[in-house]
Image (spheres, rainbow, N blue to C red):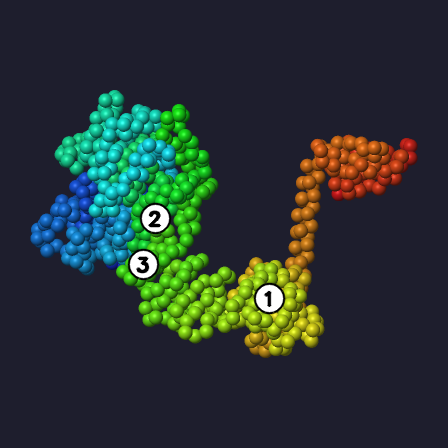
Amino acid sequence: MKKGIHQLRPYQQDIKRRVVAAWDSHRSVMVQMPTGTGKTHVLAAIIREVADEGVWIIAHRRELVEQIEETVARYGMRTAGGRVRVMSIQWLSRHWDDMDGRRPGLIVIDEAHHALAATYKELWSRHPEARKLGMTATPCRLNRMGFTDLFEVLIASDGIADFIRQGWLSAFDYVSIRPDSEDQRLVDSLSKRGADGDFQVKEMNAVLNRKPEIGRLYEALRQFADGKKGIVYAVSIDHARHIADYYRQQGISAEAIDSRTPPLTRKQLVEDFKQGKIQVLVNVDVFSEGFDCPDVEFVQLARPTLSLAKYLQQVGRGLRRTDGKEACMLIDNVGLYRLFGLPTIPRDWTAMFEGRLAGKGRTDRNIGTSAYMAMPSERTAMPGEDSRLEWVVSHADLLECLETGTHLHEKESIRNQDKLKPFKKDGLWGLRRGQTITAMAQYSEMFDVEDGLAAVRFEDYQTGIVDESGNIRLKSGCHRRMKFLEGHIVAASGKHPDIYIDLKNGKQYLEKPHVVRFGAIEMLKVGRAFFSRTTHAYQSCPDLNRLDFVARDFYLRIYDHRSPAFAHKYVDGMDSFIHRECVCILANDATDFYYFCGHLADGSIVVVDGKGLYYLVEEGREKRFVARENPATEEEDFCVVMPRLEAEARFRAEQTRKANSRKQEQKRQERLARLQHAVPFRSGTKWGLKLGDRIIVPPIYHSIQTPVGIYCAVETNPRQWGIIMLDGQVVVEARYMNVKISDNGTASLTIIPGKTRIVHLKA
């Protein structure tokens, strides 16, 4: 390896391998890696292997171009006049004619979530034969426009929580404004939106670019990051400059950087910040992407946003690891974690990549704050009555939760609990869960939605049921209306008589079914008959009563004496005349019903289906084929197989009995150990044992001694002593003149004066 080349970490090597594998079947691939995990090194390692094909690397800002050039150079690749070229999209869009007809073999788009502008689409149309690679930490947009028109597939890495737990990213402390604070009230008052769908900058500037609000920013910085080095994200250029001026007045070395800062000045300020000459850099979207300074000790969020990408890009500036950095302090002065959750919660990047979910914060104030914490620590107000800030999580609690997995998916589980709902777009209906579109708008009518299913009308006017992803569960003709009923039943009405459809097997009924439970098995009662909910459904004779149904843990036996007889064999010589009409429904089998052949010693059963195939069924397991009615080989002969199965069942039953006996004895010994501090007590003329207020041995003895270990000497009648255990079990019958128990588990029994007997005590 050449000097200066970065050794890829295991997860980076995995991403590289997955990209190369994806190119076997796709021309364009997008890669998602969290900020600070080294995606630039991954792309440099990839293009180093394909540099001879000609590689163009496109970025949307000049600073990113310079950073990529430096990284590529460390891999020994020339970008000036070489086969690898790094350009900004702005420069390229002005110099198409200056490229001398060169055709790249690979086009890499850095910060690829910006790749929806017309200039990028022109790049695709000019070079359709080139492979494409997009790199981003946040494959999402506010307007729910996916990336599938440019990239065929998304390769997502582990989440931020995984990288922190593995030690690749820094842990963080998180504090935020309180939900009832003046700061949160000001943020909640923002009602105008810009062209990009985010908060309007003009309104944000009018509300937040004021001295009282800037003063509160300073107080938060002084309280939580005093003397630390960090970045502040501001609303506007004026806001950034006012913050920097105010911080300098308080003795903090602070500078503002924005799009108007001359390039050379900006470069010098960044270098001074990295060297520690400047303590705080205040910026406006300048350091949201590509800024690499691992020793950032705090990030202060002073700019409200609805963009998940901006939120994660900003907090990500503080999550890079460096020696001596225990954690990064995230100071949220605009309450962004209530919109997006903490950085560690899982994100559905695939849904955002496909355009089914917007990368937008939720502004529903009815959702509890705890849903976004994803951590168990209690939110704690800062000291002082006027405090506007609260702890969300400390880095110690964060690391503990990441290690144990506690509540890390709370946000995801809350999202998954959102009800499935219909939405309408361009005259067609689709499905969404929360903000995620699960089925695109494609149905002409939506009748009802329940339990992850929807009753719809398709484009061909047929009606039916689809799941939340739009997969067709069944089609059921042309009905005017459809409605879900309790128990996975759907009622359909139209020109023909109303029908009722069992969604578990698609069977239709002309009379409304009622769900009846027998243990773990559900049956439908329709009129006077019962029906199983299996694909091949069983129908009982009319007027069976509940005594004809015998429910067990994993099966249901039905004594249907008037059902068609099925000649088959039975276990252990059972009377075929008595048992031949016994139908069996299995709890874990939704396909068929069976006939009961008998049970074995370990509680398992043998059943046979209508084709003459015999199965062994054990609790918690799938049925297992064992024989057939007309065997082709000896191994399939019921009479040959059954003796072996019965012997195995008896062996399993004996092993289970012994194991249960050992468990019971272990529990008994544990219970006895807890009783060793019991003491004698008297009630009337009789004695017993108590442990605190609890009576262990009732007062039934003439006399009783203090227990020794788990044993106790008791006198039933004068001069008739014996030994019991502390649970009352007799160990030595009471017929001795005296008893003395030793600590070594033996006892001396006095038969007559001068004659004793030593015994070893056993439970």
**Separation (CA) of disc 2 from disc 1:** 44 Å
In which image quadrant can residue 160 be found? top left
Pointer 3 local density, CA inside 10 Å: few below 14, some 14–19, many at least 20: some
Q: Is residue 178 left or right of residue 215?
A: right
> Can residue 31 be seen in the rendering of this structure?
no
Q: For the point 27% across and 56% down, which residue is it?
A: 148
Secondary structure beneath disc 2?
loop
**Please, what is the three-letter code of the amino acid marked with disc 1?**
Leu
Q: For the point 77% across and 38% down, which residue is it?
A: 697
**Separation (CA) of disc 2 from disc 3:** 34 Å
**Please, what is the three-letter code of the amino acid marked with disc 2?**
Ser
Q: How far across and down, in percent of the image, does residue 255 sit?
A: 21, 29
Position above or below: 219 against 631: above
Camera-side mark, 1 or 3: 3
**Please, what is the three-letter code of the amino acid marked with disc 3?**
Lys
Location of mark 1 (residue): 616
In which image quadrant can residue 7 be found? top left
Foreground residue among 596 and 45: 596
Q: Earlier in the sequence, mark 2 or mark 3?
A: 2
Pointer 1 local density, CA inside 10 Å: few below 14, some 14–19, many at least 20: many
Whether tag 2 and tag 3 are in contact, CB under 8 A, the answer is: no
Foreground residue among 596 and 535: 535
Which labelled disc corresponds to residue 157? 2
Q: For the point 52% across and 71% down, which residue is it?
A: 511
Which labelled disc corresponds to residue 391? none
Q: Earlier in the sequence, mark 2 or mark 1?
A: 2
Q: How far across and down, in percent of the image, does residue 193 sit?
A: 24, 44
On-image quarter of the N terminus: top left
Location of mark 3 (residue): 424
